[in-house]
Image: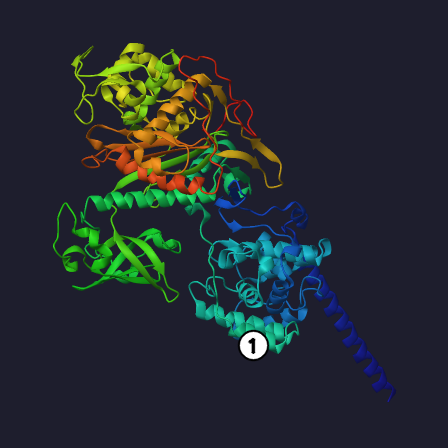
Amino acid sequence: MLTIKIRGRTFVGVVLFALLALLSATVGAAAGLILVYSTDLPQVEQLERYRPISVTELYDVHGRIIGTFALQRRVIAAYDDYPEVLRTALVSIEDKDFYSHSGINLWRIVGAAYRDIESGGKVQGASTLTMQLARNLFLSPDRSFYRKVQEALLAIQIERRFTKPQIFTLYANQIFLGHGAYGYEAASEFYFSKPARQLKLEEAALLAGLPKAPQYYSPINHPDRALKRRNLVLNAMLEDGKITAAQAADAKSKPMALDLQKDPNSLAPHYVDEIRRYLEAKYGADQVHEGGLRVFTSLDMDLQKAAHQALLDGLATYERRHGWRGKLLNIVAQGQKLDQYADPDWDEEPEVNGYLHALITQVSPSAAEVRFGHRTATLAPSDMAWVRTSPKPLAKIKLPEILQVGDIVYLKVLALDANGKARVSLEQDSGTEGALVAIDNATGEIKAMVGGRDFNLSKFNRATQALRQVGSSFKPYVYTAVIDQGASPDDTIVDAPVTFQTASGPYSPHNYDGKFEGTITLRRALAQSRNIPALKLADRVGIKTVIEYAHRFGITANIPAYLPVALGSAEITPLEQTSAFSVFPNDGVRVAPRYITKVTDYDGRILEEDFSDIKDVISARTARIMTSMLREVVLHGTAIAAAKMPYPLAGKTGTTNDFTDAWFVGFSPTLTCGVWIGDDEKRSLGEKETGARAALPIWMQFMTVALAGKDPGEFPAAPAPGSTAVAEKKVDTPDIAPGDSELH
């Protein structure tokens, strides 16, 4: 018995020794593994200085976002910006013990490892929110044992250094949630067009379910999967006691009511693109697209919408005047399939009164079916009655002769139904283009800018880049030179045939109507846009003097010094021509146009404040006389159609040879607007497509909206005949100081 006891004790000792040795080996191995896996581990201290890639945002004058620049759609938010319902939903589905564990959940890891070994797969799952944060910030996404260990080690370090709210905020701002959205604030704005703090239960549950597989559960591309995932999150919240059964049932019964955020860059794309080029040149592309700048612009979103609508409506009216031209692009003829075609216009939700391109999917003698995005519409002959007009008059519209399956047509959206149907009218896009610029007289701030019909089709900004002949809208510079040298608007000049001797030979001009009025005042000569008087006056003061005045007004183009320039053969951009005209209501003071008022960095530090350059161009006397003469153009001249508008208005029409360019540049006491219509290839717009016919209606539509409900002000009174003394008007220029503007 003694021997047995001794042997038993010996056996127990051996077992105990073996266990201690195994434990030591395990601890040593674990320590060795930790040492190996932590040698190249990132420093968690970096999180204290961590700044995620964030969006550069552009704001209009009322603080509304009009554009963004970003590699990732991300909006940085604080912990309190995320509502309790979202925090609860995320924790319930992703990490139930988030607020109690120290970075890792051993039981989940063991369970996940067992399932992975059993299934023969790689180590995956069981990641806490802290581990996910570590992986997203510091590690690769590959699923391996090595990465998993590093992930756990980093998570423990993060938990030691940061509070739970800090960790949650870092995670919530970093996680990818599909369609370019990073972080829950950006996702809430993208999917529901509202900040995260306004999320409802069913909306929060939908977003909380996305981190698992954002593309697979996309509510846009896979709504059925997203709905199931949302309801799974609601079940998890119910199991955790975070919501009641009634709340869960009510949320599950709600449909997925997405309200996708409109691309802010689509409102004023040419304007935003101008700012992008300027910012990249000054701050570099990385800072602009990753640094989270805040750019405060001069644009007014309401005026921009009015400008865009006015230009498109005006182009549609012009197109209808010239009848159906056909020659539509047909995708079937190009070998494309109907069900696979997608147009860039379909990236945004259509709006009532908006214009877009659509696909003809069916055609019968009585109707044509069209598709744009997920919507469909039916085109009946009554929706295209204007097609019967010239140049091919039709007694009756025969749809199969006009439209074919696969044609890409241009439509105006008249109404939108909840069931995906729409009511539309057939329009035409023959390639005719236009531009509109509106500038605040006192500050030089560009309030609206439309650089063309469709930014998706052409990024060329006709407002700032198109050098076009300005026609008779150049004549005010001629009359300004004459008035500035002491002439009176009541002085007379003879409108009669004349021949000028020029360096290239005799020059015998004519008036637009081919008639002559004899002796007339300068005021009437400008109001009726008579060519002969303008040429005589330019010849009298010298064409070089006239060009010098144009340059003083801010025209930078090189203008050749020959007499026909007085009739507008000079090529000027719409922006410069519009800005120049603002000198007249400004009592002779030129305020250089500006896009930007201020730029701040991510932390709110001011990087620049833009102040426009201010210069005296002409005397107040000359400016007021010219304003009164240009007012006559509206009241009794070529722009008389605008006389019915209940505001003090003035301006000048412009038409070039062969009707290739049509202009109207005009102003109220507070706002100057210029409109140009033409073809990029400089083809004729058509017989009698003058500035008054093609451009003025667009200007009137915009100005009616721009001035509605506002005090239009009054033009300063012109000096009495023979008077030379005029009290100088102090131009109201808030937030403006002398200095060169960096973006003109």
Task: Please identify the quarter of the rendering in which residue 202 is found.
Answer: bottom right
Residue 125: x percent and y percent? 57, 67
Taking the image as shown, residue 45 lies to the left or right of residue 708, namely right
Q: Position of residue 689 (x, y in %)?
A: 23, 36
| Front residue (pair 281, 528) | 528
Q: Where's residue 220, x and y in %? A: 44, 62
Could you tell whether 634 is left or right of 707 in the image? left
| Quadrant of residue 722 within the rendered picture | top left
Closest to the observer: 220 or 508? Answer: 508
Q: How many marks?
A: 1
Q: Is residue 542 above or below residue 421?
A: above
Whether residue 37 is visible? no
Choose between 730 and 648: the one closer to the eye: 648
Residue 53 visible, this angle: yes
Q: Looking at the image, is 53 positioned above or below residue 81?
A: above
Q: x, y (%) of residue 608?
A: 57, 31
Dot 1: element: helix
Q: Quadrant of residue 425 in the image?
A: bottom left
**On screen, residue 667 above or below 41:** above
What's the amino acid at mark 1? Ala
In the image, 6: left or right of 453? right
Which residue is at a point 47% across and 55% down the rendered structure image?
A: 261
Q: Quadrant of the C terminus?
A: top left
Above/below status of 370 relative to 494: below
The residue that appears at 50% across and 56% down in the rendered structure is 190
Q: Residues within 10 Å of mark 1 (few under 14, many from 20)?
A: some
Q: Which residue is mark 1?
A: 249
Residue nearer the viewer, 476 or 155 = 476
